[in-house]
């Protein structure tokens, strides 16, 4: 059974807000309004970053929330094969596409903090 458009938008909005909240959690120096979740269906970036936020996270963030993604099978295999203390990562590549790295979102944001946060360079 297909999900109603309103439910899909609510699911997407909740996901965007989770990402926004994680950014605020990991970068406490950011102020309210530095990371804004855009409305569903709006063009452009899903999360709008202020200049201060963009300095810490030089990223353009697109958020997608679906029932399932095939990539999770690959990530689960990476998790199963990862030795204790190693962070699992999946490197994927489609035909005639550039390779992509898939890692846990919280781990990624912590890497960005280490690189661009107060302790980073």
Image: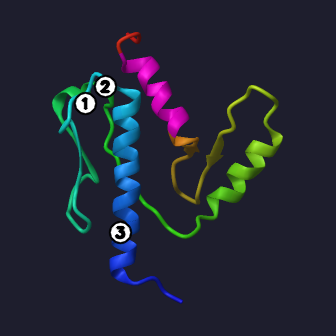
SS class, disc 2: helix
Closer to the chain start, of discs 2 and 3, is 3
Q: Which residue is mark 3?
A: 10
Q: Nearer the viewer, mark 2 or mark 3?
A: 3
Q: Is residue 74 magenta?
A: no
Looking at marks 1 and 3 on the same chain, the residue that comes earlier in the sequence is marked by 3
The residue identified by callout 1 is 53
| Residue under numbered circle 2 | 56
Residue 86 visible within the image: yes
- Location of the N terminus (image quadrant): bottom right
Which residue is at 56% across, 46% downward?
99
Q: Are marks 2 and 3 in contact (CB under 8 Å)?
A: no
**Residue 61 image point, x, y percent:** 34, 46
Q: Main secondary structure of the magenta part?
A: helix
Asked if labels 1 and 2 touch by Cβ distance under 8 angstroms, the answer is yes
Secondary element at tag 1? helix
């Amino acid at each position: 059974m297909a999900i109603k458009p309103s439910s899909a938008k609510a699911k997407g909005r909740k996901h965007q807000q989770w990402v926004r909240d994680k950014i605020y959690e990991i970068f406490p120096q950011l102020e309210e309004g530095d990371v804004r979740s855009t409305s569903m269906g709006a063009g452009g970036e899903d999360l709008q970053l202020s200049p201060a936020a963009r300095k810490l996270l030089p990223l353009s963030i697109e958020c997608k929330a679906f029932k399932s993604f095939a990539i999770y099978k690959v990530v689960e295999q990476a998790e199963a094969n990862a030795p204790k203390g190693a962070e699992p990562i999946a490197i994927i590549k489609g035909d005639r596409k550039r390779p992509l790295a898939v890692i846990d979102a919280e781990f990624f944001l912590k890497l960005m903090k280490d690189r661009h946060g107060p302790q980073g360079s």
